[in-house]
Structure formats: structure tokens, C-alpha cells
């Protein structure tokens, strides 16, 4: 820009100086020529007056002497010519040469002087061998025009004066051109400096830096442009701050959603997906810019998104995914109105919901099945008792016993269901305290001593007396150990041995209940803690089990902050083990933990 401004300014200056130089040169030359011509006219008039005042003479020598004298005084060539054109005297010609001079009657300056009183002509003189400017004026003697006085000046003098004038004009123009060029360069530099600053500000804005400011002062166009750029930068900065805030807000919402979100643009490529979808589908960080089929690697999902894009209507389906992380997803694809091929797909993980629905159905079916058996037995016994009570007292007592046993079984089943429901609903409040496991196991064994002696089963307390105190709720721990020991007594044969022990492992206490019973097949172990799951259905019901005991135990152990597991082998007995935290004196608990639900 600086070079362009300088070149344009320099061209304008050169053109202006050239025009001015040409105009001034011609004007001054014309003025100089006119000035010299006017000066010669004045001299011619003066010389004519002096000739008219001179005494009359007819000798050539007298006229020549007069011409010579007047030429020296006027500093010009003086020629005296009579009315007939005969040269009477000439200051630049010797008297001997006058006779050889041609008649001047036809000369234009002579004719002009005789006709108008003044004659002017320019031509080459063979006498002086130079171009001459001639000015003639008439003179009178004796009351009549006697002739013409002509004065002449060589044009060499005029050309010399013009040359000096042109030289002065040239150097004046050159100096003016240099000064103007310097001023133009300074002006171009100042303008280009402002333009460069505005350009840097514009480039910074293009890079996204809206803190740059031109801070232009003045009232010219570049200053106005700079202030406009500053206002534009300020406006864009505020707008971008708002857009970033909205984008971050929307991004936090999208990434905070539990549902997966996938968005495609006009080209059908993925432009957005949130972290929930990455976790659902185990996607990497390079999913953007790819097609949905390449991202999700599932034909059903890709076809669903394609249908929503191609047909322009909402499409939804429940799709099951296999692989490292099996999932059941409810996918809903909605076409975007402002994007011809854009689609918003929302993925809802319904795996847990479907699992819970399955558990609910299984629970209802199992509970119904478990309740049907004792209810049927009670109804059958009651109907039979109504008919046989009067005639057979022994049969009546037998059926009453059946009713009592099944009623007790129903009561236990209902109580277990209520306990399990309270535990899962977190209505079972725990009161943590320090528990001496050795003393606790010894006290619990007193509840099962009679049953164990009837089956000749030995109860062994293997908890060390010096073991650290456990952190637990006594009521919950009692229910856990009661269920485990009760199951061991039920399924262990006569002469077996049941042990309750505890050891410290990895910062926790590991409590175990071990029996030397028949053991459990490996295929049953993964489902052993499920509701109503029984290894031996017929025998479990015969022994009065509800199928909920181990499920209650698992939930109580987890509520105490521990984990439970089982190890067993057919013919080698079974060991149930769970962990409890160790009591520390600095532990504190809320008062609410002491309240029972």
C-alpha cells in the first residue's frame, strides 16, 4: 500500500510539475520575448526621436556617424533607412559596406513602421550571421516623415535569457519534485503504517483474538475504519462469549445426560456424541467425522439413523447389542428440521430395566408358586378336616398339624419377603457398634445346641479370642449367621461338623461358616443368592425353607459394607464367607443410624 500510494503520489507530482514547468516555460518565454520586444520598441522610439532632432545632413558619413553613436548609447544595432528603402547608416556596418546593402523598402518592419508607426520582424541576418529581432519606428525631419529608424538585437541574447530562465525553472521544478516526493513518501508511510496496524488487527480478529484494538485517533477515513474495527471486535467478542457460554452449557447438559446422544450433519457424518454413548458402545475419541455405521458397528442402528435421514420421519427401535459389554438399547432417531440430512439419535440403556422386569416377573412367578403350595395344603387339610373331624379324631389332629405347619411356612415366607423388601428399600436401619465375634458366635450357638445334638452335629467356634473387634449391626449380624448356620444344620447329615470362624485379611475381618455336608454342585453356585433359587427344590420345601434366606444374607452383608461368597465341592462340604470392617475408636456415626426402621 505504501509503494502504491508513493507511486501514485509521485506520478501526480511529476505530472503536475511537468505541466507547470511546460506552462511556466512557455509563458515566461512569451513574456520575456514580449518584454524584449517592448523594450526594443521604446528604444526604437527614442532613437527615432534623436534622429529627428539631429541636424539635417545628406552625407553618408554623417548618417553613419549618427547611427553609430545612437547604437552605442542604446546598446542595440541602429539602422537609419530613408522612405525609399535606402540605408543611410548602420551602427554594425562600416561606411564602405553601406553601398553594398540591399534596398530595405520591402522589409516587413520598414513597411510596418511607415504604415502603422511600428514594425516588428524576426529573421536571419547575413551581416551579423545570426537571427535578429527588428523593431522599426518612423522619424520626421522638416515636418515630414523622412524615413525609418530600425533597432535590432540578436536572438542569441534572447535565447540566452530564455536558457537561464529554463535552467532556473528546471532546478526549481527539481527541488519542488524532491520536496514533494519526500512529503509524499512520509504521507504514504504514515497512511501505510495506519493501514498495517488495521491489517494486523483484522488478522488477529481472523485468528479469533478479539482483544486486539486499533485505537485509532483522528478524523480521517482510516481512523474511522479503525474505530469501526474496534467496535466490530468488541461486538464479536461479546457475541462469541455468549455463544461459548451457551455451547459449554449445552455441552455440560449433553455430557451430563445418562442417555447417549449422537448428532449427524448435512453430510451424514457424526458431529457430536456424548460421553454416555461412548461408555455404552465403548467408542474411542476419533468418532467425529465418520459415518454412523462406522462408529456404532451395528447394522440395525445404522439403518435406523439412515431411515430417519432419508425418509424425514422419526424412527425408533429397541436393539440388543452383543460383545464385551452386552446392552439393550432403546434408540430414537429424529430428523432435524434445519438440517436436510441431520439426525439426532438418543440411546437409552434399558438393560437394567429389562433385567428388573425379568426379575419382577420371575419373583411374582416364584412367590406365587411358593405361596400356592402351602395355601393348597391348608385348603385341602381344612376341607378334609371338615368331613373327618367328627368320625376320626386322629385324622383330625393330623390335618390340624398340616394346617399349622403350612401356616408357619406362610408366616416365614411373608416375614422373609417383608425383611427383603425393607432391606432393598433401605428402610432397614443399621446401628453400628463394636462386636466381639468370638463371644457373638458362642452366644449364637446356644440357639442351635438342641437341634445339633439331635442330629449329633458338632458346633465349633473357631473365632480367635484375641481377634480385633468387628464393626457391625448386631441384629443384622445375628440374622446373617442364623441363616447360614440354620442352612448348614438343615442340609448336613448326622455326625457332621459346623464351624464358625474369623480371620483378619487385607484390612478386614473374614467371617466364615463351614460344614462337612454333601456340598453343592458348581453349576448352582453362581445363582445361589437369587431369590427362591433352590439346589434341591423338594428337600428345601420339606425342610421348611423359603428360598429367600441367602438373598437376605447377601443384602445384609452388603448393607454392612462387606462382600459374601461361597466355596463348595460335592461330597466335601460348603463354606460361606463374608467380610466385615474392623472397629476403630475414632469412628463416628450419625444419630439416625441408631433408629430402627
Image: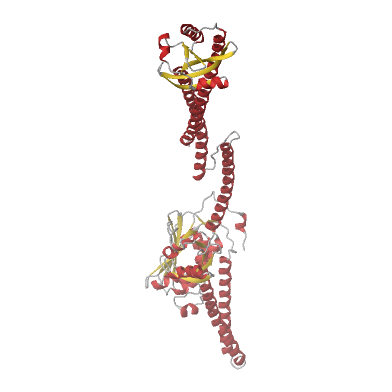
Q: Is residue 155 above or below residue 57?
A: below
- The answer to whether one can see residue 483 in this image is no
From the top left corner, tell me how far across and down residue 225 is, in percent. Answer: 57, 40
Work out which residue is located at the far bottom of the displayed protein and give it. 391
**Snapshot colouring:** secondary structure
From the top left corner, tell me how far across and down residue 195 is, in percent. Answer: 51, 37
- 498 and 457: which is toward the camera: 498
Res. 49 image quadrant: top right
- 388 and 62: which is toward the camera: 62
Residue drawn at 58 percent across, 38 percent down: 221
- 375 and 184: which is toward the camera: 184
From the top left corner, tell me how far across and down residue 253 is, in percent. Answer: 56, 57
From the top left corner, tell me how far across and down residue 114 is, in percent. Answer: 55, 20
Residue drawn at 53 percent across, 15 percent down: 147
Number of numbered callouts drawn: 0
Q: Considering the image in quadrants, where does the C terminus appear?
A: bottom right
- The answer to whether one can see residue 22 in this image is yes
Q: Is residue 347 above or below residue 205?
A: below
- 414 and 268: which is toward the camera: 268
Residue drawn at 50 percent across, 35 percent down: 192
Amino acid at each position: 500500500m505504501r509503494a502504491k500510494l508513493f507511486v501514485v503520489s509521485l506520478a501526480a507530482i511529476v505530472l503536475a510539475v511537468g505541466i507547470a514547468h511546460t506552462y511556466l516555460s512557455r509563458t515566461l518565454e512569451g513574456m520575456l520575448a514580449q518584454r524584449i520586444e517592448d523594450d526594443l520598441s521604446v528604444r526604437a522610439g527614442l532613437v527615432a526621436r534623436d534622429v529627428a532632432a539631429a541636424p539635417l545632413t545628406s552625407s553618408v558619413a554623417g548618417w553613419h556617424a549618427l547611427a553609430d553613436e545612437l547604437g552605442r548609447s542604446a546598446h542595440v544595432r541602429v539602422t537609419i533607412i530613408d522612405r525609399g528603402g535606402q540605408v543611410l547608416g548602420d551602427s554594425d556596418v562600416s561606411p564602405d559596406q553601406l553601398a553594398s546593402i540591399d534596398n530595405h523598402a520591402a522589409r516587413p518592419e520598414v513597411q510596418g513602421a511607415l504604415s502603422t508607426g511600428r514594425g516588428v520582424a524576426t529573421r536571419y541576418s547575413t551581416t551579423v550571421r545570426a537571427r535578429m529581432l527588428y523593431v522599426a519606428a518612423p522619424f520626421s525631419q522638416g515636418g515630414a516623415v523622412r524615413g525609418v529608424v530600425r533597432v535590432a538585437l540578436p536572438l542569441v541574447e534572447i535565447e540566452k535569457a530564455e536558457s537561464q530562465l529554463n535552467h532556473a525553472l528546471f532546478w526549481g521544478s527539481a527541488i519542488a519534485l524532491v520536496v514533494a516526493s519526500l512529503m509524499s513518501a512520509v504521507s504514504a508511510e504514515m497512511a501505510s503504517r495506519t493501514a498495517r496496524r488495521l491489517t494486523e488487527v483484522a488478522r488477529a480478529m481472523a485468528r479469533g483474538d478479539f482483544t486486539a484494538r486499533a485505537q485509532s485517533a483522528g478524523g480521517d477515513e482510516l481512523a474511522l475504519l479503525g474505530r469501526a474495527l474496534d467496535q466490530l471486535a468488541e461486538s464479536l467478542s461479546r457475541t462469541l462469549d455468549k455463544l461459548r457460554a451457551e455451547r459449554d452449557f449445552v455441552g455440560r447438559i449433553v455430557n451430563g445426560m445418562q442417555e447417549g446422544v449422537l448428532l449427524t450433519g448435512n453430510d451424514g457424518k457424526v458431529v457430536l456424541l456424548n460421553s454416555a454413548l461412548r461408555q455404552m458402545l465403548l467408542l474411542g475419541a476419533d468418532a467425529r467425522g465418520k459415518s454412523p455405521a462406522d462408529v456404532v458397528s451395528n447394522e440395525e442402528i445404522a439403518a435406523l439413523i439412515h431411515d430417519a435421514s432419508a425418509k424425514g420421519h422419526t424412527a425408533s427401535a429397541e436393539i440388543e447389542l452383543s460383545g464385551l459389554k452386552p446392552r439393550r438399547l432403546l434408540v430414537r432417531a429424529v430428523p432435524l428440521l434445519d438440517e436436510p440430512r441431520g439426525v439426532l439419535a438418543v440411546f437409552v440403556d434399558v438393560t437394567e430395566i429389562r433385567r428388573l422386569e425379568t426379575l419382577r416377573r420371575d419373583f411374582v412367578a416364584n412367590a406365587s408358586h411358593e405361596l400356592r403350595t402351602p395355601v393348597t395344603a391348608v385348603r385341602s387339610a381344612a376341607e378334609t378336616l371338615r368331613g373327618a373331624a367328627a368320625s376320626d379324631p386322629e385324622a383330625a389332629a393330623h390335618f390340624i398339624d398340616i394346617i399349622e405347619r403350612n401356616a408357619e411356612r406362610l408366616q416365614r415366607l411373608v416375614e422373609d419377603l417383608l425383611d427383603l423388601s425393607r432391606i432393598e428399600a433401605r428402610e432397614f436401619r443399621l446401628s453400628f457398634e463394636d462386636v466381639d465375634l468370638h463371644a457373638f458366635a458362642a452366644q449364637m450357638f446356644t440357639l442351635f445346641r438342641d437341634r445339633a445334638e439331635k442330629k449329633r452335629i458338632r458346633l465349633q467356634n473357631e473365632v480367635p479370642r484375641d481377634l480385633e473387634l468387628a464393626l457391625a449391626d448386631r441384629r443384622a449380624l445375628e440374622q446373617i449367621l442364623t441363616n447360614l448356620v440354620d442352612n448348614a444344620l438343615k442340609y448336613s447329615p448326622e455326625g457332621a461338623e459346623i464351624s464358625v470362624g474369623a480371620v483378619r485379611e487385607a484390612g478386614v475381618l473374614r467371617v466364615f461358616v463351614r460344614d462337612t455336608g454333601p456340598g453343592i454342585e458348581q453349576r448352582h453356585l453362581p445363582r445361589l443368592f437369587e431369590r427362591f433359587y433352590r439346589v434341591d427344590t423338594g428337600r428345601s420345601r420339606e425342610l421348611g425353607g423359603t428360598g429367600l434366606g441367602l438373598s437376605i444374607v447377601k443384602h445384609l452383608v452388603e448393607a454392612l459394607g462387606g462382600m459374601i461368597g461361597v466355596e463348595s465341592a460335592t461330597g466335601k462340604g460348603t463354606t460361606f464367607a463374608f467380610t466385615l470392617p474392623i472397629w476403630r475408636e475414632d469412628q463416628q456415626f450419625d444419630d439416625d443410624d441408631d433408629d430402627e426402621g
